[in-house]
Structures are given as structure tokens and as C-alpha cells.
């Protein structure tokens, strides 16, 4: 892969990144919903109609640990293979249905995995950590506490 191509992805790695990011955005929207933050107001991404740009903002911190690690795990362990799990058309490349199922399973395993949260000094899942970042944002907005 020489560069990131999003719309449409033109190679398997870009296809995995796009698909993984869309899964992460979806999970982030759900977690932000629990915090009652306005999802259309953001700080990093341009707000636009019909787009929950706050989920794009909060997801940025989780892309490396959730999306990219899931991609590395699937590729390095040959769970996803170019010859079996992608559809290549004239100017785009996407995961086929089998590839999507494999990736979704690996993604769910990753986002639901438990880690030691350094600030809370307790164990939590990555999915819950996204919601906790939403609460941290509320504390920053209302009380000026560091985010």
C-alpha cells in the first residue's frame, strides 16, 4: 500500500481500514449515545448534516488499538487472505461476505477485550473506554478537567 485511498478503497489494506473504521464509528456512536453528548458537535472533524462528527473525533484515539491491531492480527495470522476474502473490481476492492464475517468476529473480540485502564486503575473493555472518553469530554466542557 503506497497511500490511503478511502472512496472507494483500491487495495485490500485500504478495504480493511475502511471497513474497520466504519465498525468503530458505529460502536462509538452507540457509546456516545449513552453519555447524552450532542454527536453532531465536534472538535477535530468538520460537522455536516447527517454525520455524527463527534464519533469521528473520539474514534481517532481508538483506531490504532482497535482497528489497526485487528487488521494486523487478521493478516499476520492469515485469518483474512487476499485470494479468498476480497472482491476486486475495476477501480475498487472490498471484503467479500466471508471476509466481513471473519473481520467482524475479530473486531468484536478486540473491542470487548479487557485491559488495565491506567487512569482508573481498574480493568475495563475498549468499548467501555470509548464511553468513558465521552464522560471525560463532558468533564472537560463543564469543569475544565484535562481530557
Image: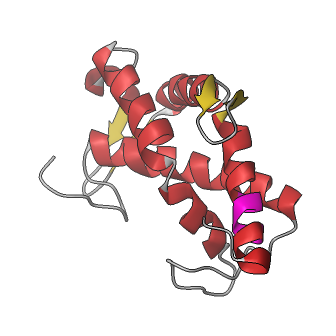
Q: Is residue 147 above or below residue 53?
A: above
The x, y position of residue 105, in whole percent, is: 60, 23
| Residue in the picture at 49% in, 44% down | 20
The x, y position of residue 143, in whole percent, is: 77, 76
Which sits in the foreground, 130 or 2? 130
| Number of dots carrying numbers | 0
Dominant secondary-structure state across the stretch colored magenta: helix
Which sits in the foreground, 54 or 115? 115
Is 7 included in the stretch rendered in magenta? no
The x, y position of residue 81, in whole percent, is: 31, 21
Is 135 included in the stretch rendered in magenta? yes
Left or right: residue 112 compared with residue 97 = right
User: In which quadrant is the C terminus drawn?
Assistant: bottom right
Give the image's coloring scheme.
secondary structure
Quarter residue 144 falls in: bottom right
Q: Is residue 29 above or below residue 128?
A: below
Magenta-highlighted residues: 134-138
Q: Is residue 110 above or below residue 92?
A: above
| Residue in the picture at 36% in, 33% down | 86
| Residue in the picture at 68% in, 69% down | 145
Quarter residue 4 falls in: bottom left
Left or right: residue 105 compared with residue 87 = right
| Residue in the picture at 25% in, 54% down | 90
Which sits in the foreground, 142 or 38? 142
Which sits in the foreground, 121 or 6? 121
Left or right: residue 3 compared with residue 41 = left
The x, y position of residue 15, in whole percent, is: 37, 46
Amino acid at each position: 500500500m503506497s497511500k490511503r485511498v478511502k472512496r472507494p478503497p483500491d487495495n485490500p489494506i485500504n478495504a480493511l481500514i475502511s471497513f474497520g473504521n466504519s465498525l468503530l464509528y458505529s460502536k462509538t456512536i452507540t457509546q456516545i449515545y449513552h453519555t447524552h453528548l450532542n454527536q453532531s458537535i465536534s472538535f477535530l472533524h468538520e460537522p455536516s448534516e447527517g454525520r455524527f462528527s463527534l464519533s469521528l473525533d473520539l474514534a481517532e484515539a481508538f483506531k490504532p488499538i482497535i482497528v489497526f491491531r485487528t487488521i494486523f492480527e487478521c493478516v499476520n495470522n492469515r485469518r483474512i487472505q487476499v485470494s479468498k476474502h476480497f472482491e476486486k473490481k475495476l477501480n475498487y476492492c472490498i471484503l467479500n461476505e466471508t471476509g466481513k464475517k471473519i473481520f467482524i468476529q475479530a473486531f468484536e473480540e478486540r473491542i470487548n477485550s479487557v485491559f488495565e485502564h491506567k487512569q482508573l486503575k481498574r480493568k475495563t473493555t475498549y468499548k467501555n473506554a470509548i464511553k468513558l472518553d465521552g464522560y471525560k469530554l463532558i468533564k472537560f466542557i463543564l469543569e475544565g478537567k484535562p481530557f
